Amino acid sequence: MLITGVNGISLELHVVGYEFPSYKNPIDANWLIVEGRVTHPKGDWSFREPCLETGDTEELANWLETVAYGLEAIPSICFTERHLVFEVLSRNSERILRVQFAMEARPPWLTSQNSIFLEFPVLSREILVISKAWRNEACQFPAREQ
């Protein structure tokens, strides 16, 4: 999934695999490693963390589609591990997709323990493209028996 914004800001997210490819503990069966690359004027950064479960990836795709189609959606979505939070905002006639980065997904140059967020002005059709790309990638790692 690639989201681009103004001033050269971008976010690229990929599901790269199960945290435990050969799991023995069913509780750990569906944790996924997510790799993120962020381009930012203050400095680029990347992370690679087991921060989503298989159900989270589908939930994010569904939420993005709901937002894209203009249906009533909860304004933000977060997960068990709060590395990433997605939010949709409306400013004037513009829609903003805000992504918050916390914990190990934060940039190394951020000196405080706070999180940081990026804002991406988006059109509905762009959100739909983002959602489809995310769903296509995440479906390679389906939920496993617990």
Image (cartoon, helix red, strand yellow):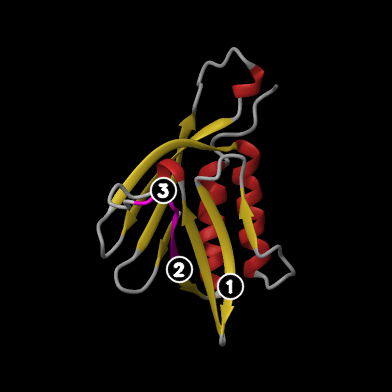
Which residue is depicted at the point 61% across and 37% down?
Answer: 54
Q: Position of residue 103 (x, y in %)?
A: 45, 43
| Residue 87 sits inside the magenta stretch | no
Q: Nearer the viewer, mark 3 or mark 2?
A: 3
Question: Secondary structure under badge 3?
Answer: loop
Q: Dot 2 lies on which element?
A: strand
Q: Residues within 10 Å of mark 3 (few under 14, many from 20)?
A: few
Q: Quadrant of residue 118?
A: bottom left
State the quadrant of the C terminus.
Answer: top right
**Left/right of residue 7 with respect to residue 17 in the rendered view:** left
- Residue at 27% x, 51% y is 109
Instruction: Give the residue pinned by disc 1.
Output: 89
**Residue 86 percent coordinates (x, y):** 56, 58
Q: Magenta span has 115?
A: yes
Residue positioned 67% across, 70% down in the render: 69
Chain part drawn in magenta: 112-118
Residue 119's tag is 2
Whichever of labels 1 and 3 marks the residue nearer the N terminus, that label is 1
- Residue type of the residue flagged with mark 2: Glu
Residue position marked by numbered label 3 in the rendering: 113
Total marks drawn?
Answer: 3
Whether label 3 touches label 2, CB < 8 Å: no
Is 76 or 58 nearer to us in this picture? 76
